[in-house]
Image (spheres, rainbow, N blue to C red):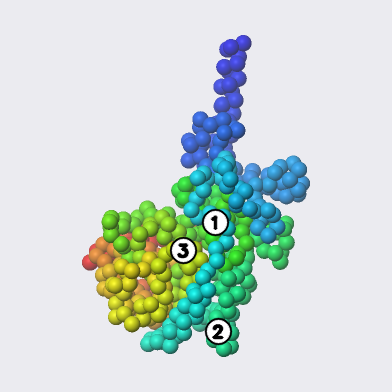
Amino acid sequence: MAWLSKRTVFLRTFIKQLFDKIFLQSSSQELLRHYSNKQRPKVALFYNYLGRLLFAVKEIIALISKGVIFIKSIRLEFFDETDFNDMYKAGAIDMLWPKSPFVEISHNVVDESVYNRIERAYQLACKYDPNQMLMSKWWTKMSEEFQKYLFEDSGKLRKEYLMNFRCLRSADAQIITDQLWVVNKDIGYVKSYLNAIDLVLEYHRFAQIVKNETLASLSESYAGNNLCPVYRGKRLSYRLLTNAIYLQGILKNVDFVKREKNIVVEIGGGYGSLLRLLNVYLSGNCYVMVELPEVACLASYFLSYCFPDKKIAFLQDIIELDQLKEAFDIYDIIILPPWCMEKIPTQSTQLVINTMSLGEMSKEYGTFYLRHIERILKKRGYFYSVNRLYADIDGYDDFGFFNWPFKERYLTLSYKHLPLGYPEWIGQKLN
């Protein structure tokens, strides 16, 4: 009997390991080798192709049977109860413990003075722009649309729009519309849940190139009031997964100077979703966001919401400075319009980031940015780019990556095609 009992245990272990090998990614197989089925932390489970197929089938059956045959793994905000206070009263095998700093238990309230400061910064950005460079057709259209929704005819900022900018279908720009790709009140519960299954499958697929611990930690902010699927105690979105890839590339390849406040400049960072992640993973640095005035309004609100205790500078705080050297020491985040690139001191910046926007600019705007990027980067500073190779779409004026007129020499640290359809290039300036 003892012999048979040992062989039964062996057979059970073998079946479990075979199941893991068939359905789990290799990192999860090794991590969970010694856990019993009941003790296994689901938060560390990431599925391979067959595992994702099995997950999709299970969730569809759970949806059709209304949770009778299988329990649904995903909750949808607006449709389902998603109280994070209840979820995180204690640790659970399907959630990261202790709670990630990216998980917001409740909604923040932005101080009233922030709205006044955003409005004033926008007025100054438009008034004192000395360049008036020609934008691409696409960004001209986007700026006009954002201006229409952000401001009343009198020029007064629409506070309600900012508070809800990620749940309103108000422009063609993807930084707005991609918030509605998954959970959407207008398309109903069933379609939203099927969309959420697709997103969770991408979450598991991305674990092949992003550290499991990183994916398990990231969660969307409530800023802008977007709706998300909640999976394993986190709010997920496609933009969050995209930023996870950018974050991984930066953390892996960029070596910041220790015991020094490094300067990071992000050009075209949208409303600040990547900068939010960097501020936590690489804290203690000064982050400069450079954006078109209308989009800078969104970033100013979003970052003020996410970091109420950070010192954030708007244009009026630095407009009289010839250079930003003094501001770097005072502020944690600085939000600027494009023409203020000239205020960033030469060879002051450790890292410049641009994702999916330089290739969409007019040649005039793109050349302007590239000239200043090479000027402000320190020797051995880093340039992180994810951009189209060719600008072969009408209105982009041929400023894809292969058209960039580099003047400096760079050591390429990373050059690979991402699942986003664009190449990731990380160069280290040698001069």
Looking at numbered disc 2 in the image, what kind of residue is underneath it?
A: Lys
Point out residue 173 in the picture as x, y percentages from the top left corner. Answer: 56, 73
Q: CA distance from mark 2 to mark 1?
A: 30 Å
Residue at 56% across / 30% down in the picture?
Answer: 36
Establish if 270 lies above or below 282.
below
Q: Which residue is mark 1?
A: 104
Relative horizontal placement of residue 99, taking residue 56 as reference (left or right): left
Give the mark, 2 or 1, whose residue is nearer the N terminus: 1
Residue sticking out furthest to the top: 1
Point out residue 366 in the picture as x, y percentages from the top left corner. Answer: 39, 77
Circle on res. 307: 3
Establish if 322 lies above or below 179.
below
Does residue 424 appear in the picture of this structure?
Answer: yes
Circle on res. 156: 2
Label 1 secondary element? loop
Residue at 58% across / 18% down in the picture?
Answer: 7
Establish if 140 lies above or below 254.
below
Relative horizontal placement of residue 294, taking residue 52 as reference (left or right): left
Looking at numbered disc 1 in the image, what kind of residue is underneath it?
A: Glu
Label 3 secondary element? loop
Relative horizontal placement of residue 25, taking residue 280 as reference (left or right): right
Query: Considering the image in quadrants, where does the C terminus appear?
Result: bottom left
Q: CA distance from mark 3 to mark 1?
A: 12 Å
Point out residue 126 in the picture as x, y percentages from the top left corner. Answer: 45, 85
| Label 3 packing within 10 angstroms: few (<14), some (14-19), many (20+) | some
| Label 2 packing within 10 angstroms: few (<14), some (14-19), many (20+) | few
Does residue 395 appear in the picture of this structure?
Answer: no
Give the mark, 2 or 3, whose residue is nearer the N terminus: 2
- The image quarter containing residue 255 is bottom left
Residue sticking out furthest to the front: 112
